[in-house]
Image: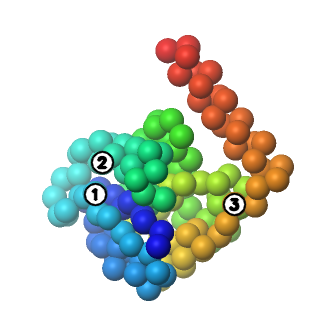
Amino acid sequence: MMRIALGSDQAGFQLKNIIREYLPELGMEGKDFGAFSQESGDDYPYLAAKVSESVVRGTYDRGILICGTGLGMSIVANKVPGARAALCNELFCAQKSRQHNNANILTMGARIVGTELAKEIVKTWLTTEFAGGRHTVRVDKYAEIERKYADAG
C-alpha cells in the first residue's frame, strides 16, 4: 500500500481533508501533517519541509501539499534536497511530472482547482509511473545540481 504524506496551509485545509479521505478509494493511505484548522497557516513553510523530508527519507512514498495557489508549497518543498515537487493544477502536468520528472511531491492550489479536478489530478499523479530511460539521466542531473550548490554553501 502506497503511503502518502499530506500537508496544507489554511487555504488548502478543506481540499487536503477531501484528498485524505479519497486516498483509500485508490488503495492508498494518507498521513496528515497539518494544518489541522482553517486558522492562520503562517507556519506552512515548516510543514511543507516536514512533508518533503518524510518523502525524501522514505518514510512516505510520496507527498501532496496544498495551499491557495500551490506556489508557496512548491517553492518550499523544492528546498529539501531530493524533493522533486511539481505544481500541477491540471491533468497533463500531473501525468508528465511523474512520467518525465519522477516527481515525488505534488502541489496544488485549492483556490485554482475544484474538488473533482483535484481528485483526478491526484489519481493521475499517484497512478502514473516514471518512464525511466532517457528521463533517468535528466533526473540524475537534478541531484547533481543539488550537490553542486549544497557543496558551494
Task: Depth check: give the residue in front, 20 or 72.
Answer: 20
Residue 52 visible from this viewpoint: no
Where residue 61 sits in the image (x, y, percent)?
A: 48, 59
Check disc 1 and give the amino acid type.
Phe
Where residue 135 sits in the image (x, y, percent)?
A: 77, 50
**In this picture, is 140 found above or below 121?**
above
Mark 1 surroundings: few (<14), some (14-19) or many (≥20) residues within 10 A: some
Instruction: Determine the secondary structure under disc 2.
Output: helix
Instruction: Determine the secondary structure under disc 1.
Output: loop
**In this picture, is 27 found above or below 52?**
below
Pair 3/2: label in front? 3
Which residue is disc 2 drawn over? 47
Instruction: Determine the secondary structure under disc 3.
Output: loop
Mark 2 surroundings: few (<14), some (14-19) or many (≥20) residues within 10 A: many
Check disc 2 and give the amino acid type.
Leu
The Cα–Cα distance between marks 2 and 1, rounded to whole angstroms, is: 7 Å
Mark 3 surroundings: few (<14), some (14-19) or many (≥20) residues within 10 A: some
Task: Depth check: give the residue in front, 22 or 37.
Answer: 22
Q: Earlier in the sequence, mark 2 or mark 1?
A: 1
In contact (CB < 8 Å): disc 2 and disc 1: yes
Which image quadrant for residue 35?
bottom left
Q: Residue furthest right?
A: 134
Q: In this view, does 9 lie to the left or right of 19?
A: left
Q: Which residue lies furthest to the top in this view?
A: 152
Q: Which mark is residue 130?
A: 3
Check disc 3 and give the amino acid type.
Phe
Residue 4 visible from this viewpoint: yes
Q: In this view, does 11 lie to the left or right of 114?
A: left
Q: Residue 112 carries which label?
A: none
Which image quadrant for residue 4?
bottom left
Which residue is disc 1 drawn over? 33
